[in-house]
Amino acid sequence: GSSKAASLHWTGERAVSVLLLGLLPAAYLCPGPAVDYSLAAALTLHGHWGLGQVITDYVHGDVPIKVANTGLYILSALTFAGLCHFNYQDVGICKAVAMLWSL
């Protein structure tokens, strides 16, 4: 039951990490909307899972855990929405990073 779910979660975390390793050169070699939105999703998910582990390790008590997890879901949703808005309304993640490198 929970052991299999934990194993699947661990596998998913590793898959997203490997995906991010592939997206970084893709963002440089062939920037575009597909890579921008893939980065938005993968970075948000990676951050969500990482901060979830911080909550698991450092937040104790039923109410504080519920409050922290609710805050994490709100933060993750806003992060993804903000990155998507940036991709749609502005230059996108790939071009923004390229512009920063050109400074």
Image (cartoon, grey):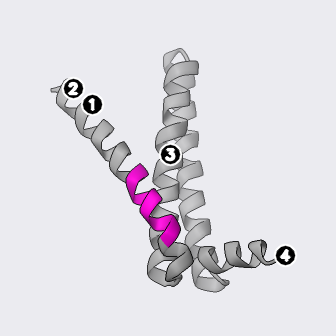
- How far apart are the alpha carbons under marks 3 and 4? 30 Å
Viewer can see residue 91: yes
Q: Residue at x 46, y 52 (%)?
A: 45
Q: Which residue is mark 1?
A: 6
Whether the residues at callouts 3 and 4 have beta carbons within 8 Å, the answer is no
Viewer can see residue 59: no
- How far apart are the alpha carbons under marks 2 and 1? 6 Å
- How far apart are the alpha carbons under marks 1 and 3? 16 Å
Q: Which residue is mark 2?
A: 2
Question: Does the magenta segment cover residue 98?
Answer: no
Whether the residues at callouts 2 and 4 have beta carbons within 8 Å, the answer is no
Q: Which residue is mark 4?
A: 103
Disc 4, SS:
loop
- How far apart are the alpha carbons under marks 2 and 4? 49 Å
Q: Which residue is mark 3?
A: 48
Q: Earlier in the sequence, mark 1 or mark 3?
A: 1
Q: Which residues are magenta?
A: 17-25
Q: Amino acid at mark 3?
A: His
